[in-house]
Structure formats: C-alpha cells, structure tokens
Image (tube, rainbow, N blue to C red):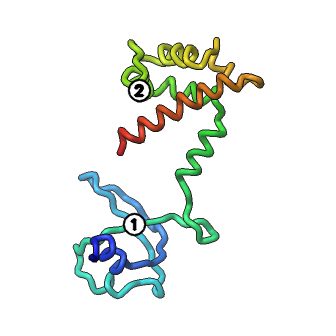
Amino acid sequence: MRTLADQAKENSIRLECRKDGLTQRQNGDWVIRLTVQAIDMHQVIVNAAMGTRFFCTLTELNDDETPVDHVAEARDKWRELGPTKQAGIRCGDPVFWAWLEEEMGCTDVNNHEAAAKIVREKCGVISRSDLGLPGNQEARTRWYNLDFAFQAWRALENA
C-alpha cells in the first residue's frame, strides 16, 4: 500500500538554491527569497499558479556537498565549554530550575544561587569550579549524568 510519505517522495522536487533575501512582514509572516539556477528550475514550479502551496524541506550544504549537521555543531560547542561553564549556564536557566523541582524533587529553586547549591550538592563539590579540576572525575561524571537527564527531559517536553 502506498503511504503519504511514499507519495510525497515520488512527487518531490529536488533543486539547489541560495538564500537571496529575508524580510518579515507586519503580520509576522516571513518572506524568503531563494535563487535557483536555470538548469535546476523545475517546470512544475514554473507552471504553478501564484499562491500554490508547496511543502518545503531545506538542508544546508557544506562546500563538499554534505549536509551541515547543526545538532552535532551545537553538541560539540557545549562539550568544549567544559563542566564548570556548563553548570554555570544551566544554573542560570529557569527551565533547569523547573526540572530540578519537577524531576529531582527539589524545592524553592527560583534563582541561580538556589540551582547552584543543588548542583554542588548533587555533584559532591564545594564549588562548581571543582568540576573542572584534574582528578575529579567522579564529580564530573555526576554532573554529566545530571545534565544528560535534564537534556532528556527537555527533549521529551519539546517533542
């Protein structure tokens, strides 16, 4: 049986384009202007009436024609920060505070310092800067486990 996904794939139009303009209208809608080389322009688009609806999927390309992996880029930037800075950022995030209350059973987490106190307790350190000290692998592991649990919760909340 042919599914909607099969039908969409069979009727999809593949072309390369470049972002040429971006403006926002007063009503909040966005206007994206894309430039398509003549050789890539599909006749279905040329013949379609103005106002015809299309479902678009855009994938940013690297210079070597591979897709840009924004998820990996963000993950790598987060890793490069290290556990001390990561903990500092999380402790300033009201969503992290809500997670500490909802999922970790903590109370009165309504500011940066309250979150920092809980992180220090959960990781077994006196200061969040201790997370970056050599030989403090157990505390780092506790931090990473805490952060991974938060990220998993956030992903489920956003799904």
Q: Amino acid at mark 2?
A: Trp
Where is residue 25 drawn, in percent x and y? 29, 56
Q: Is residue 83 left or right of residue 104?
A: right
Q: Which residue is mark 2?
A: 99
Kind of element beneath mark 1: loop
Q: Is residue 66 left or right of residue 150?
A: right
Q: Which residue is mark 1?
A: 57
Q: Residue at x 62, y 19 (%)?
A: 128
Q: Amino acid at mark 1?
A: Thr
Where is residue 133 drawn, in percent x and y? 74, 23
Dot 1, crowdedness within 10 Å: few (<14), some or many (≥20)? few
In which image quadrant can residue 9 be found?
bottom left
Where is residue 38 drawn, in percent x and y? 46, 86
Q: Nearer the viewer, residue 48 or 91?
A: 91
Q: Gap between marks 2 and 1, in whole Å?
A: 33 Å
Q: Residue at x 51, y 23 (%)?
A: 91
Looking at marks 2 and 1 on the same chain, the residue that comes earlier in the sequence is marked by 1
